[in-house]
Image (spheres, grey):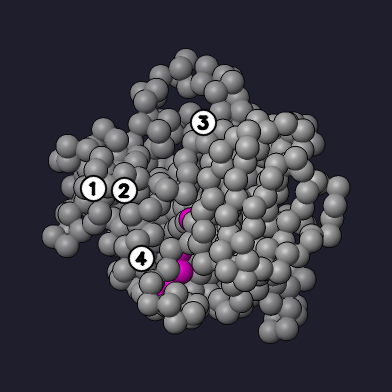
Amino acid sequence: MIFFHSNSPLIIKPTYPISWRSNCKQKTPVLIPTIKHFSCKFRKKKGLIQYKHNCIVIMACFSKMGNGCFRNKKEKTQAVASGLDVMNDAMVEAKLNPQHLVIMVNGLIGSASDWKFAANQFVKQLPDKVMVHCSQCNTANLTFDGVDLMGERLADEVSNVISCRPGFQKISFIAHSLGGLVSRYAIGKLYEPNETAYPSVAKKNCTEDIESFGRDCTGRIAGLEPMNFVTVATPHLGSRGHRQLPFLCGVLFLEKQASQTAHLIAGRSGKHLFLMDNNEAEPPLLVRMASDSYELKFISALRSFKRRVAYANVNYDHVVGWSTSSIRRLRELPKANLLAHDKKYPHIVHVTHETLDDVRLMPSYAENQTIDYEEEMIRGLTQVPWERVDVSFRKSRQKYIAHNTIQVKSYWLNSDGVDVIYHMIDNFLV
């Protein structure tokens, strides 16, 4: 779908069918049949056209073009961009689509290019099996809009990708930092209980009784079979207190001030990260995302994946703490003498694999017993088994930017994280 200002000239040379809307009020898109090539120019502002396998995206600041669909910030944040598709050239030439769709999601103030290196490596190693889609719907200041709005945009983008490319059978998510929370919200929106195979399960809350039907609590994500859900340095427990924001050094006064001022820096996303969005009617969003609700089945969606993996920086990540990114209590973090280096993956220092047998029922609480938000989130998220991969760049010259190195955001600055990407690929279920 292409949105553009009604006064902007559009020059079209025939190619694939294109649908467009001249304004937001027109709900039914107009189809333009074409034959060969497509080009687009704006007289007032220069636009960037990106052509990706029959997908055309206008990456321009439409809000600067005058009155139209993007005339203010609020309307602009509701626009869904198409993102970047990475696929093997031979598959493109043969007009074949892989069966496995991999969605890569950026973090705070990020963009689709953050996953460029990883996406290329996935396609290089698994050329005929995967197509990688790097999400572009939440970039730059759009990442300040809050986990819920970002999650809805991501869900819409994933649905659009699947509808434009029929043939996918499987889906996986790989997300960095805040993108992991956004992905968890999105899969809650995209989750579809498997009512045909398990009609009784579809009507139940899968968090109610793990022993009785936890193994059968299956479903699909956007109509596809869920395979891998991978988070990289994601603050699953938020950034509030308990050294979850390492650069504050655990100073109670600084952590308190950060909680109160986070919204001034990161908008609604800051409120969500520091659990400051609670009210008398309901708890903070991240706490709600640690359980199934009537409308959104967050834990059921997580459980539907064959694997759930949390990559976490042990040290030198000044943005996301070790415990919040690995979904552990501080006392559960591995001791230094248990950390070992792998010759094949030199920066992978500890790996644990949970199974369904390791997952226990949530303990019952006494009526007068109260638990804090962090404990509530841990108990909720650990209802499903996780693989935890601990990463350390302690001996690396790039250790002070570990938060980006673990993702290889830029190969020239973060190349030491390459072994982490290869570890993801080698253990990826296709």
Alpha-carbon neighbours of circle 2 within 10 Å: few (<14), some, or many (≥20)? many
Do residues under tags 2 and 1 come within 8 Å of each other at their CB atoms?
A: yes
Residue where numbered disc 3 is placed: 240
The image position of residue 284, as x and y in percent, is 66, 37
The correct choice, above or below, for 256 with respect to 216 in the image is: above
Q: Earlier in the sequence, mark 2 or mark 3?
A: 3
Q: Which of marks 2 and 1 is nearer the N terminus?
A: 2
Q: Residue 279, can we see it?
A: yes
Q: Earlier in the sequence, mark 4 or mark 3?
A: 4
**Amino acid type, label 1:** Ser
Do residues under tags 4 and 3 come within 8 Å of each other at their CB atoms?
A: no
The residue depicted at 29 percent of the width and 35 percent of the height is: 401
Q: Which of marks 4 and 2 is nearer the N terminus?
A: 4
User: In which quadrant is the C terminus drawn?
Assistant: bottom left
Q: In this view, does 306 lie to the left or right of 269?
A: left
Alpha-carbon neighbours of circle 1 within 10 Å: few (<14), some, or many (≥20)? some
Identify the element where label 3 is drawn: loop
Residue where numbered disc 4 is placed: 122
The correct choice, above or below, for 204 with respect to 367 in the image is: below
In-front residue for pair 362/150: 150
Front tag of 1 and 3: 1
Alpha-carbon neighbours of circle 4 within 10 Å: few (<14), some, or many (≥20)? many
**Range of the magenta residues?**
129-135
Front tag of 4 and 3: 4
In-front residue for pair 3/365: 3
The image position of residue 29, as x and y in percent, is 79, 60
Residue where numbered disc 1 is placed: 415
In-front residue for pair 172/387: 172
Identify the element where label 2 is drawn: loop
